[in-house]
Amino acid sequence: MTAAGASADSTPDPECAPVESSTTAPETSVTTAPETSAPEATVADESTTTTTDADDCAPTSVVESTAPTTSSPAATSTSTSTTSTTSTTSTTTTEAPGLGETEPAPSTQPPALVADMPNPIGAAPQRGTDRQVAETLPPPITTTTTTLPPEWSLPKNSGEGRRVVYRKSWPMRVWTVESTGAVSKTHLVSGRATWNQPLPGTYSVFSRSGYTCNIKNPNLCWRYMVRFTKGPGGDNIGFHEIPTDLRTGYKVQSESQLGLALSGGCVRQRTSDALYMWNWAPVGTKVVVLP
C-alpha cells in the first residue's frame, strides 16, 4: 500500500489505486497589478494536473483552483500553490468588483493525522502487558475492643480457676468465671445480710435439686436448687430462683429488689439466672464467698 505523501511516480497499491482526473484550465487572462515593488501580475498557465482523491489508504486532498477571468481592471486573481512530499494545499481569494472586501475561497481540510486514520484491519487496539511493580500488601487488621461494664469486673481476692464468686456486700452479686479467668456471666442476687450465713470462704457444690421447699415453712418452694454449704442450724444454703408462696401463688419478692439482703440464708435469683446457674454449676463446682 502506498504511504501518504509518496511521489506521483511511485507504483500505486492495487487495493488503493488513486483516481486520476484531468482538468484543463480555460484560456488565461493577464491582469496587471498596481504599480508596486512586487513582481508583475501572476499568469495562470494552462496545465493538466493529476489529483489523488482521498481514500482509506491515503487521506490527502488536492484542489486546483484557477482564477476566473474578469473584464474589470480592479479585479485581481491570486493563485498560491504549495506542494510538498506529504500534502498539497491551495488557497484562492477573489475580490468582487465594487465590494471592496475579500472573501476566502473554499479550501480543503488539513490532512488527517495518523491517529485519526481507521484501523486498516479493523482490529481492536493492542494493550500493553500488565506488570506488578510492588508487592501486594495484606488488608489491614481490624481489631474490635469490647469494654465491659464495671459490674463485670471481678472483686479482688476472688480465687482462681473455674468458679462461682458470691459477694455478700451491697449490691449482692455473683459471677461465673471460666477456667481461663474470663467472666462468662454476672447478675444480681438476694442473700442474707448476717456475716455468718454463709461465712466468707471457699466451698464446693455438693447437692442439687430441680424442685424443693423450705424445711421450716413447706409453703415456700422453688426450682433449680444448687447447694454449696450449710447454715449454723444445719439448713442447706445454695443458689435457686425466688421462692413462691403456695398459699398465694406469688413470689416472696420482686426481681427489681434483687441486690438487697432479703433472704433467710440462700441466694435468690431471677428464674432465667437460676436456670443458667443450674446448667453451669454441676456437683464439684468451686464457690468463693466474699464479705
Image (tube, grey):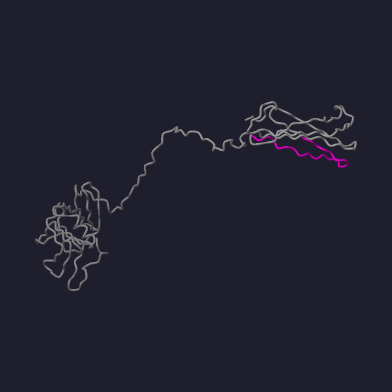
Q: Position of residue 231 (x, y in %)?
A: 12, 59
When the figure is inspected, residue 97 is found, relative to residue 13, above or below; the finding is below
- The residue lying at 25 percent from left, 57 percent from top is 187
Residue 92 x/y as whole percent: 79, 36
Apparent side of residue 244 relative to residue 148 in the rendered image (left or right): left
Q: What secondary structure is the magenta-colored segment mainly?
A: loop
Q: Residue at x 19, y 68 (%)?
A: 244
- The reply to whether the magenta stretch includes residue 66 is no
Left or right placement of residue 36 versus residue 123 in this view: right
The residue sitting at 84% across, 37% down in the picture is 68
Tell which of 220 and 109 is nearer to you: 109
Residue numbers of the magenta segment: 91-113
Q: How far across and down, in percent of the image, does residue 130 sit?
A: 47, 34
Establish if 141 lies above or below 241.
Answer: above
- In the displayed image of the protein, which residue is found farthest to the left? 234
Q: Quadrant of the N terminus?
A: top right
- Between 207 and 265, which is closer to the camera in this rendering? 207
Q: Residue at x 25, y 64 (%)?
A: 255
* Res 196 quadrant in image: bottom left
Q: Left or right of 127: which side holds 284?
A: left
Task: Give the number of callouts.
Answer: 0
Q: Is residue 103 magenta?
A: yes
Question: Where is residue 22 shown, x and y percent of the image?
Answer: 76, 33
Quarter containing the C terminus: bottom left
- From the viewer's side, name the closer residue of 270 and 2: 2
